[in-house]
Image (cartoon, rainbow, N blue to C red):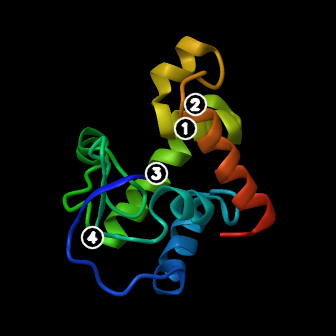
Amino acid sequence: MTVSATRAAPPRGRERFLAFIRAAELRHALPNGLLDALIAVESAYQPGVVSRAGAMGLAQLMPATARALGVLDPFDARMNVDGGARFLRAMLDKFGSVTLALAAYNAGPAAVMRARGIPANSETPTYVRKVLSAWRLGSF
């Protein structure tokens, strides 16, 4: 995550968001802790963050993805987390692999399909490793 702009945010911290992160994981049948790890890497639990690429909120949804998911306010933490959970679930269903789902979350599903795996760009392999590490070690 690289922050280029920040909306006025309430107090940061995992504890503030954990209940609805866990609820979204359950609601969308995600592996326990995976969405939590993804959010830790994506935004470090900062709901008002905007990346250089324009991704917004806790789950760092791109504007077009947020619209497609019906996330009306990407800075509403609950809406953003639920949208991120739904997108991650869709990528898991599409690719059948946590690793490829994370790559698609980061680089887009078309990039994963073109690469027939994790795209060999400057960001995605590192991103996938960070999320998997945080998830497996619970170090998020």
Give the class, few, some or many, for how many residues have Cα within 10 Å of label 2's Cα (few <14, many ≥20). few
Q: Are marks 4 and 2 in contact (CB under 8 Å)?
A: no
Q: Is residue 93 visible?
A: no
Q: For the residue labelled by badge 1, is the local secondary structure a helix, a strand or a loop? A: helix
Q: Nearer the viewer, mark 1 or mark 4?
A: 4
Residue drawn at x 32%, y 65% is 79
C-alpha distance separating marks 1 and 3: 9 Å
Badge 3 amino acid: Arg
Q: Which residue is mark 1?
A: 91
Reading the image, the residue beneath label 3 is: 86
User: CA gap, disc 1 to disc 4?
Assistant: 22 Å
Residue 106's x, y, as percent? 49, 39
**Is 17 above or below relative to 114?**
below
Q: Amino acid at mark 1?
A: Met
Where is residue 101? Give x, y as percent: 60, 38
Q: Residues within 10 Å of mark 4 (few under 14, many from 20)?
A: some
Give the amino acid at mark 2: Lys
Above or below for 79 versus 104: below
Q: Are marks 2 and 1 in contact (CB under 8 Å)?
A: yes
Marks 1 and 4 in Cβ contact (< 8 Å)? no
- Residue 94 got which mark? 2
State the residue in front, 56 or 68.
56
Q: Is residue 27 left or right of residue 83?
A: right
Quadrant for residue 67, please give it.
Answer: top left
List x then y, in percent, for residue 27.
Answer: 54, 65
Q: If you read the primary sequence from the N terminus, does the residue marked by circle 4 or circle 3 appear first?
A: 4
Q: Looking at the image, is mark 1 or mark 4 earlier in the sequence?
A: 4
